[in-house]
Image (tube, rainbow, N blue to C red):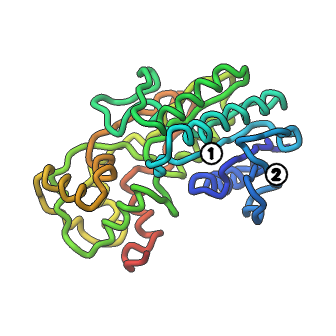
Amino acid sequence: MSQLVALTGATGFIGRHLLRALSERGFRVRVLLRRPVEVPEGASSAVVGDLARPMNMAAALAGVDAVVHSAGLAHAMSGAPEDDYRASNTEATRRLAEAAARAKVRRFVFLSSIRAQSGPSAAGILAETDAPAPTDAYGRSKLAAEQALAEIGLDWAALRPVLVYGPGVKGNMAALLRLARLPLPLPLASLDGRRSLVSVESLAGAVETVLAAPGPLSRPLVLADPDPLTLPEMIAALRSGAGRGPGLLPAPAGLLRLCAGLAGREEAFARLSTGLVARADGLRALGWAPATTTRDGLAALARGEGLARGEG
């Protein structure tokens, strides 16, 4: 019989893709939902419960081979208090992992973040061997969750993805899509900070790799596609997918930063224009390979999101 995986966050951007991908790969998926909703397509069963107060998860985890925990408070909620991040990302993860240990679950896969390891930019190439140095409440809460997993006594893996893109993406990548849709030349050609991205399809492949890997793992794993791009290259790839030229012009980076600040988009601009390159050494050693190149993935995203038609 195929593995039974309990999945949290199945109604979110990443969770929806994981549910579909795991089901297509032959896993049976039991979704753990916070509130009664229609059971998402692809789920073999569903259980409703509060992850922050999992009083009795025995039934939810009965017969489960592995847990994939993608629920949590997203980085996009940048105004949230540190206590909220700790409650949603650290304590809820710890309690679910404790319940998984009691249920004799074979492996716990946690969707962490590269922000558990680094700030929004990094001077060198990030790898699992680097000492973690988160710079905000979100990153600290993810790192604390990883540290809690290490103390519980079950086999676990924490995936630390860089910025994830794919159909239905929100946050900074959605803003980049909207920017690329503009039928205007963009003064971004001079920006040279390279950033690693990862497609949601590559992320799903990484989860499958970790679920299939011989154990124990019990460590974090950086997740990034191997071809980092500059912001102009990202725009060019998106516009290429829509059958358009890059339409990029040079302008001083300082002026662009000022304009982004005036528009209330300084943080988003910094995340996409400065450098953050990571390499997925641990996952590659386990046999993982990206689903596509970043350029091809962004072009496909543009075609799927209707960039050429100016939708959304």
Q: Looking at numbered disc 2 in the image, what kind of residue is underneath it?
A: Val
Percent of width and height locating residue 280? 46, 33
Question: Residue 70, labelled with which disc?
Answer: 1
| Quadrant hosting residue 93 | top right
- Residue depicted at 65% across the width and 51% down the height: 9
| Quadrant hosting residue 274 | top left
Q: For the residue carrying disc 2, how many other residues have a C-alpha within 10 Å: few (<14), some (14-19), or many (20+)?
A: some
226 left or right of 190 in image: right
Mark toward the start of the polypeptide (2 vs 1): 2
Percent of width and height locating residue 152? 71, 22
- Residue identified by numbered label 2: 47
Q: For the residue carrying disc 1, how many other residues have a C-alpha within 10 Å: few (<14), some (14-19), or many (20+)?
A: many
The quadrant the C terminus occupies is bottom left
Q: Is residue 302 above or below residue 309?
A: above
Q: Can you see residue 63?
A: no
- Residue depicted at 75% across the width and 63% down the height: 37
Q: Looking at numbered disc 1 in the image, what kind of residue is underneath it?
A: Ser
Percent of width and height locating residue 169? 49, 59
Question: Residue 237, labelled with which disc?
Answer: none
The quadrant the N terminus occupies is top right
Q: Can you see residue 244?
A: yes
165 left or right of 156 in image: left
83 left or right of 59 in image: left
> In terms of secondary structure, where does tag 1 sit?
loop
Return the residue nearer the eye: 222 or 202: 222
The span from disc 2 to disc 1 (Cα, nearest Å) is: 16 Å
Q: Residue furthest bottom?
A: 309
Return the residue nearer the eye: 240 or 156: 156
Return the residue nearer the eye: 177 or 59: 59
- Residue depicted at 36% across the width and 67% down the height: 178
